[in-house]
């Protein structure tokens, strides 16, 4: 069993599934069921792979390595640490949920449209697994760029009225980041040991490049990741894309894909360019805190609920980046846990908001009001998702946000305090939104036949809320999975946790 | 300074002295205290309409079940030696990473159990009351689910053995409060009130989070045992900052100045909620937090002084506002603020005040809850009206309500030998024994507050139950059903006798001494008898004045314009106007401005310019965008080949 190439299989299954869907005859009636089956199979495979993973071991595991283009030093190398595995798990859990949520997005009208839609989602799943599992820098780059293709089509062909512009904007921003990164990728190879496996991550960490070269290489990667994450001020593509995308696409885009940005910062920026990372830290911290506050303030201002959710994510990504660059075990564990939690929270927010939009036919918040009396269950679960978004203790996001704040405080108290104001702002953007949607008298222009949550929709929401509660009260298994990887990262950067001042004083005396 | 050493000195000498022994027997089952109501909330919310029939009753029974468990634990605790009455119930490893390690666990000691009894007893009575009060509400089940949720969260708050777990309960009660204030949120004003409560509380919660960050930074831990055990090894400045942050947290939850503005609006919630959450229990959480953190406050006189000042300001603030309110619930809310101000003042006085603060907290829990339930009964009788100017002469119509309310009224004005007399007088005496100028200032404020309290509570009492009937035409007052009156009677009895039962017998001091140490009597600035006589005289004056104006004289049905002072008090001393002008409006402006800037400057100009430039380039290449996936794939492939070629050349 242990010799099974789990990651390759997990990569291949959804990719082949997508291929099969394309090859099926036009109007294949069971496209959705087929795709759901494939995604569930991938999920089960991931569970088996997870069982093979030894928690507490900080080395790369489930490792596979094949020579691919030796002439260029490129290997097809896969492997995961705790952070990568948690991201893959998040992806394989969210994809089936999204497929169920997207059940009625595209009518089964006998054309290829529906097949295409679910095939793109499956292909995207394969890319997501690949990007998190790649342990070859070039392979990572390929997945990083290739991922854009399914998203581009998911937005550009299946999105809202302004989809073309949104998809192009998304593509332009991402390509810009990708191009800069490409230069850095090639540059990195030249300073590395080279050879037929010169792009292997293991050969490129701990190089001690130093000087201007390291700083430039760091910037090349960081800018790409900052756009992807996205951070202030390169965030404006996200609200646009998330608004025009279908809710299920938005979930995968914001909930998983954007994590590649913060994942990349941890895996590439910090580990390969430790000196430059320390050099850049003050600026990054300022940008992160700005993202937290700016995203939250903008979220309060939004009139379109999908845009609102997108801005809450910008605020939350600010927290994640803040924790990563505060570089304490607590803050980075918090950030990586936040990456998982944010996936579930955002998924619930987008999908439940999507249920409202499907009923009312409008994303404009002002078009609602009193919906607690129209669809009590949808309104209630929206509130729960919102409470998770404002980091209510007992729900998932709280633990991670708390860890980021207190962990950051150990090194940058001012940044932690400023960032923590996001806690107050979060209450404002969530509760004001909920108030406008759900409270007030029952609207008169809504048909009395408007259905509350259907059974299918319950299957979408129930696992997400279960995840909120489990991760809120018992995050230990996930923390145990993440912490060794965080410790390794911090060792690479060469920083140690500050000791509590009381014992520090005591040991001096 | 000797007093200071009794509690903190013990902690400093031997950190293990404050570490609890692991619980056995009944106490090991203390988690049931929380689990029972939590189960109720879960069942009623998930079960949906299927539980409509039996849900409310089930919730009530589970709450009583929690009380029984609490009583059994107290019995076990009482059987132990005074020094052993601190038990821990470890639950599970919650958050452990880096130098942070928080195990969820419960701390069972006299302080937490005093709260447990208050919360579960008064809470269960209010469940019973709600069976009658909410009888005809279509969403009754949801109401009881939230009530159970509240009880569970409040018990987490007081039973937690670490600041982090306390915070779960802290925000949990905030959530329950939000849900219940907005229970009738089809009324937009009520929905706004709920939001206001949550957001203002979040400001306090923010401070609490920073306090925890500072604790972790300083002590490397968040559990009480470590933080309190090592409190003394930190610098005084650190302790002062932590103390002030905790105080700001307490101000939010306990509606103390400057975070008091939400409590009046919170009266939008159904009256049982006002009684339970916004009078008897949740709003006292701030007092609990300061009392629980005594190891920190003992070492920082500055932070303690800040606590006392906040208490003193709020006790006057609430009392002044209470004099002008015509809405019976808002008048009671102002009074709650003021009474919690007394408790804050007492905990701010340090070891001499802790026990009396908790004492007043318990008696207040009884008499204020009783009066709120009474107000609910009055509203029940008067078609849900709350304007006291349209009440009057109700004493004859609803006798049980009148008598039970009267008991609460006597207690709060501090009529001799009622519960409030014992507890409030001791706070006033303690205030006079504070060192230096503080003794005079706090003592006189507390004394003056007692007089004003007597005035505004008597005003409320007389306007409602005495004088001439000023009812609207459709009013037909009738007494409430037994489910409502029995809890009122129980609380009324408590309001009268609880003080005599707990204090002269030494039960309360004996119970709490293991936690707070023995508060030695200080030299008071004025002889004790002098204080007692002054309090009595002021009380009598307040009642008499109120009688002349609101009992004997005609009360106008429409409030007269009044002096500037009256108008200011009626508008809560302009707190909302202040917030509107200095916080909300500038905030809204900032947010709107940023939205424009994000679209025009960042998206349109700076970053957008770059992307537009790219788009310009892309325009040229646009011809390639023919929509065929094949050609895209081909282009990408070509690109990759070119890149790989470049690398090869470089080599």
Image (cartoon, coloured by chain):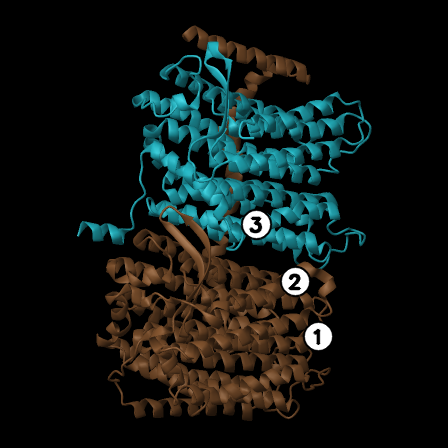
Q: Is residue A298 above or below residue A187?
A: below
Dot 2: within a 10 Å radius of its alpha carbon, few (fewer than 14), some, or many (20 or more) residues?
some
Question: Which residue is label 3 attached to?
Answer: A468
Residue A462 picture location, percent across and down: 65, 49
Q: Residues within 10 Å of mark 1 (few under 14, many from 20)?
A: few
- In the rendered image of the structure, the colour used to display chain A is cyan
Residues B496 and B306: in front is B496
- The residue that label 1 is drawn on is B135
Determine the residue positioned at 30% across, 91% down. B530
Secondary structure, mark 3, is helix
Residue visible at 55% across and 50% down in the picture: A470
Identify residue for label 2. Answer: B43
Colour in which chain B is drawn: brown
Task: Determine whether the residue tagged by mark 2 lies in a helix, strand or loop.
Answer: helix
Subunit bearing disc 3: A
Q: CA distance from mark 3 to mark 1?
A: 34 Å
Could you tell me which quadrant the C terminus of chain B lies in? top left
Query: Label 2 to label 3, Cα distance in Å?
Result: 18 Å
Q: Regarding mark 1 in the picture, which secondary structure is present there? A: loop
The residue positioned farthest toward the left in the image shown: A509
Work out whether residue B414 can be spotted: no
Q: Residue at x 37, y 64 (%)?
A: B247
| Callouts 3 and 1 in the same chain | no
Q: Relative to the observer, which residue lies in front, A119 or B92?
A: B92
Above or below: residue A228 compared with residue B434: above
Give the camera-side residue of B72 and B430.
Answer: B72
Q: Quadrant of residue B21?
A: bottom left
């Amino acid at each position: 069993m242990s010799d099974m190439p789990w990651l390759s299989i997990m990569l291949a299954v959804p990719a082949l599934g997508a291929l099969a869907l394309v090859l099926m005859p036009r109007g294949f009636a069971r496209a959705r069921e087929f795709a759901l089956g494939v995604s569930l199979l991938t999920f089960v495979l991931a569970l088996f792979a997870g069982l093979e993973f030894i928690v507490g071991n900080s080395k790369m595991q489930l490792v596979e390595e094949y020579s691919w283009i030796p002439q260029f030093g490129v290997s097809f190398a896969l492997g995961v640490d705790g952070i990568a595995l948690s991201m893959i798990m998040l992806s394989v859990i969210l994809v089936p949920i999204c497929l169920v949520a997207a059940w009625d997005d595209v009518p089964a009208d006998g054309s290829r449209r529906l097949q295409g839609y679910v095939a793109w989602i499956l292909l995207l799943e394969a890319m997501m697994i690949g990007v998190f599992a790649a342990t070859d820098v070039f392979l990572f780059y390929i997945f990083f760029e290739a991922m854009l293709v399914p998203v581009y089509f998911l937005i550009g062909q299946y999105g809202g009225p302004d989809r073309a512009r949104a998809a192009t904007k998304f593509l332009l921003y991402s390509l810009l980041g990708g191009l800069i990164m490409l230069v850095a990728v090639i540059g990195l190879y030249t300073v590395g040991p080279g050879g037929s496996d010169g792009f292997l991550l293991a050969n490129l960490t701990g190089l001690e490049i130093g000087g201007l070269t390291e700083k430039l290489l760091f910037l090349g990667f960081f800018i790409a990741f900052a756009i992807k994450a996205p951070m202030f001020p390169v965030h404006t593509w996200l609200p646009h894309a998330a608004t025009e995308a279908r809710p299920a696409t938005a979930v995968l885009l914001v909930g998983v894909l954007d994590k590649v940005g913060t994942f990349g910062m941890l895996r590439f920026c910090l580990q390969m360019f430790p000196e430059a990372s320390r050099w850049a830290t003050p600026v990054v911290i300022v940008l992160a805190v700005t993202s937290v506050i700016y995203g939250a303030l903008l979220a309060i201002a939004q009139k379109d609920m999908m845009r609102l959710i997108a801005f809450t994510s910008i605020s939350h990504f600010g927290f994640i980046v803040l924790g990563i660059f505060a570089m304490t075990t607590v803050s980075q564990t918090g950030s990586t846990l936040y990456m998982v939690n944010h996936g579930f929270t955002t998924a619930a927010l987008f999908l439940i908001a999507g249920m409202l939009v499907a009923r009312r036919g409008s994303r404009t918040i002002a078009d609602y009001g009193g919906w607690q009396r129209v669809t009590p269950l949808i309104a209630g679960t929206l509130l729960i998702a919102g409470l998770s978004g404002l980091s209510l203790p007992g729900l998932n996001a709280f633990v991670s946000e708390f860890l980021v704040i207190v962990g950051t405080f150990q090194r940058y108290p001012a940044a932690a305090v400023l960032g923590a104001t996001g806690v107050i702002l979060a209450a404002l953007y969530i509760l004001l939104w909920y108030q406008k949607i759900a409270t007030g008298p029952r609207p008169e222009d809504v048909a009395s036949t408007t259905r509350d949550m259907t059974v299918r929709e319950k299957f979408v929401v129930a696992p997400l809320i279960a995840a909120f509660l489990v991760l809120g009260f018992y995050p230990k298994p996930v923390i145990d999975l993440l912490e060794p990887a965080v410790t390794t990262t911090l060792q690479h950067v060469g920083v140690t946790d500050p000791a509590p001042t009381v014992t520090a004083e005591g040991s001096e005396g | 300074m000797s007093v200071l050493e009794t509690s903190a000195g013990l902690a400093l000498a031997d950190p293990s002295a404050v570490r609890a022994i692991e619980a056995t027997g009944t106490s090991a089952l203390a988690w049931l205290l929380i689990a029972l109501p939590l189960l109720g909330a879960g069942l009623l919310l998930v079960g949906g309409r299927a539980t409509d029939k039996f849900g409310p009753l089930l919730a009530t029974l589970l709450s009583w079940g929690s009380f029984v468990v609490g009583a059994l634990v107290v019995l076990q605790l009482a059987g132990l030696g005074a020094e052993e009455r601190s038990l821990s119930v470890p639950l599970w490893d919650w958050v452990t990473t880096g130098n942070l390690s928080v195990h969820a666990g419960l701390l069972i000691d006299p302080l937490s159990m005093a709260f447990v009894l208050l919360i579960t007893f008064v809470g269960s009575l209010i469940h019973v009351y709600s069976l009658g009060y909410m009888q005809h509400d279509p969403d009754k089940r949801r109401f009881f689910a939230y009530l159970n949720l509240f009880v569970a969260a409040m018990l987490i708050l007081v039973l937690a053995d670490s600041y982090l777990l306390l915070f779960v309960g802290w925000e949990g009660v905030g959530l329950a409060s939000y849900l219940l204030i907005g229970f009738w949120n089809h009324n937009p004003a009520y929905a706004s009130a709920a939001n206001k409560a949550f957001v203002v509380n979040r400001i306090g919660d923010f401070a609490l989070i920073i306090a925890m960050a500072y604790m972790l930074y300083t002590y490397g831990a968040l559990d009480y045992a470590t933080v309190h055990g090592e409190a003394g090894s930190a610098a005084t400045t650190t302790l002062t900052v932590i103390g002030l942050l905790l105080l700001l947290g307490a101000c939010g939850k306990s509606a103390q100045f400057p975070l008091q503005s939400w409590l009046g609006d919170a009266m939008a919630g159904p009256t049982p909620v006002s009684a339970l959450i916004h009078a008897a229990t949740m709003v006292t959480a701030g007092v609990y937090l300061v009392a629980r953190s005594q190891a920190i406050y003992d070492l920082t006189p500055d932070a303690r002084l800040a606590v006392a000042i906040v208490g003193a300001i709020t006790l006057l603030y609430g009392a002044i506002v209470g004099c002008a309110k015509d809405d019976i619930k808002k008048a009671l809310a102002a009074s709650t603020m003021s009474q919690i101000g007394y408790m804050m003042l007492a905990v701010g006085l340090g070891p001499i005040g802790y026990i009396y603060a908790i004492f007043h907290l318990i008696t207040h829990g009884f008499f204020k809850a009783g009066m709120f339930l009474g107000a609910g009964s009055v509203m029940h009788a008067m078609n849900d009206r709350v304007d006291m100017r349209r009440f009057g002469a109700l004493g004859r119509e609803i006798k049980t309500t009148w008598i039970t309310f009267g008991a609460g009224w006597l207690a709060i004005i501090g009529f001799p030998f009622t519960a409030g007399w014992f507890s409030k007088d001791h706070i006033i005496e303690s205030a006079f024994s504070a060192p230096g100028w503080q003794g005079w200032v706090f003592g006189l404020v507390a004394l003056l507050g007692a007089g004003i309290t007597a005035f505004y509570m008597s005003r409320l009492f007389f306007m409602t139950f005495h004088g001439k009937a000023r009812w609207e035409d459709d009013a037909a007052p009738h007494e409430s059903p037994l489910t409502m009156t029995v809890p009122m009677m129980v609380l009324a009895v408590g309001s009268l006798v609880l003080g005599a039962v707990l204090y002269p017998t030494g039960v309360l001091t004996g119970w709490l001494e293991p936690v707070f140490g023995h508060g030695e009597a200080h030299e008071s600035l004025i002889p004790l008898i002098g204080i007692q006589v002054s309090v009595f005289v002021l009380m009598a004056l307040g009642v008499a004045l109120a009688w002349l104006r609101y009992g004997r004289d005609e009360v106008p049905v429409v409030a007269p314009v009044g002096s500037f002072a009256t108008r200011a008090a009626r508008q809560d001393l302009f707190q909302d106007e202040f917030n509107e002008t200095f916080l909300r409006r500038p905030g809204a402006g900032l947010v709107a401005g940023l939205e424009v800037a994000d679209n025009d400057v960042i998206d349109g100009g700076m970053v957008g310019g770059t992307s537009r430039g790219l788009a310009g380039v892309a325009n040229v290449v646009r011809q390639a965008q023919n929509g065929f996936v094949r050609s895209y794939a081909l282009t990408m492939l070509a690109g990759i080949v070119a890149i790989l070629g470049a690398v090869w050349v470089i080599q």
